[in-house]
Amino acid sequence: MSNKPIVKYVFLWVSIGFFLVSIAYKHFFVTIKNNPLQNSEQVSIKLEKELKSVEEPIAAIKSIIIDTAQHLSFNLLLKKTEYPYYIFSNKVVIFWSNNLYTPKYGDVLGDFHVSYIETTKGKYIARKEQFFHEKKSYDIVFLIPLVEYSAVLNEYLKNVFNEKIFSDSNFEISSVPNDQDQQIIALNELDLFSVKFGNTYANVSQTSKSIIIVFIVLSFVFVAVFIRKQLMYYIHDRNIGHGFLFLFFCIIILRSMMLITSFPFDFVYIDLFDPKHYASSLVNPSLGDLILNLISLIILGFYILNYYLHSSAIKKILKGSRRIKIIAAACAIFLVFSG
């Protein structure tokens, strides 16, 4: 039996192999190891880390208020922070670091240090520092988002979850447990909220995520090498038209499969493919997809410019009558402007 087909498609087999390895790695080392208890523990650890990150700016802001209470200004209170914060004086907001949303005092009402709150904008963990100074009450409130609602929900735009706390969007949050499958998230014996993890929730560490992405990139590199080698065969045999069709259908098949399966966004979270940054249509559901589509068009254009202009079909048109040239030019102009 000849081994020529095996040699001819070796890069394709290697590409498929790397992709299967990425699937196997995710299944056996990520998904299969997850359970709700482990997921809730990870969420608690990550949430505690984010809460600790706001302690230093809270102390700095409090010190500014105490030292310059008579001359407070927006610029004095403005600090570069990871999360938005708001300052209330005698229950009236006097500062907000985020122009997109400002909570009402009623949203953060109560004598608490850390609390779970739900607003019209989303679900948050509020860290509040209350104190009195010169007969005035002050509340410094940091909002750490768990889930923020999108203004428009559709198949492209979805609610945004905090990637520093959750590694996957497949979960539901509520203030009190109403399902036996829900896990309570608590800090220092204080119950904050409950969460129900979906069956496919993937608690992927940064290391595991990087490994999966490397396997995926290698898979695409080898499939690109395979496509290029096949194109060289067509070009060598002067089958420029067949080569173009081969390249065109390879790109169409790959991109269609990615769009239908929401790959890689539903497989492993990559920020570039998150619709929250950009989403315009079925073929451009994310910024990453838009970039891939542009690269695909550039590759097709490069092939046409470098090879197709020297094909026998183009030579016949150039040597043809004036009518044929006009028809060909009209078709080209139509394709350019209709695209």
Image (tube, rainbow, N blue to C red):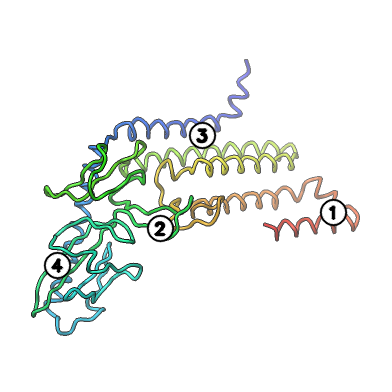
Q: Residue 154: image x %, image y %?
A: 47, 53
> For the residue labelled by badge 3, is the local secondary structure a helix, a strand or a loop?
helix
| Left/right of residue 311 with respect to residue 56 in the rendered view | right
- Comparing labels 2 and 1, the label whose residue is closer to the camera: 2
Q: Please tell me in which quadrant of the rendered image residue 181 appears.
A: top left
Q: Nearer the viewer, mark 4 or mark 1?
A: 4
Q: CA distance from mark 3 to mark 2?
A: 37 Å
Q: Are marks 4 and 2 in contact (CB under 8 Å)?
A: no
Q: Disc 2 to disc 1, how far (Cα)?
A: 54 Å
Asked whether the residues under the numbered discs 3 and 2 touch, taking CB atoms below 8 Å apart as contact, a structural biologist would say no
User: Where residue 285 appears, x then y in whole percent?
Assistant: 51, 52
Q: The disc labelled 3 sits on which kind of residue?
A: Ser
Point out the tag, 4 or 3, that comes first from the N-terminus.
Answer: 3
Query: In front: mark 4 or mark 3?
Result: 4
Return the residue at label 3. 15
Residue at mark 1 to residue at mark 3: CA–CA distance: 41 Å
Q: Nearer the viewer, residue 87 or 29?
A: 87
Mark sitting earlier along the chain (1/3): 3
Direction from residue 216 to residue 65 in the image, left or right: left
How far apart are the two marked residues, 4 and 3, measured between alpha carbons? Answer: 53 Å
Which residue is denoted by mark 1 in the rendering? 318
Q: Which residue is mark 4?
A: 59
Q: Amino acid at mark 1?
A: Leu
Q: Which residue is mark 2?
A: 150
Q: Residue at x 37, y 39 (%)?
A: 211
The reply to whether the C-beta atoms of the residues labelled 2 and 1 are less than 8 Å apart is no
- Residue at the extreme top: 1
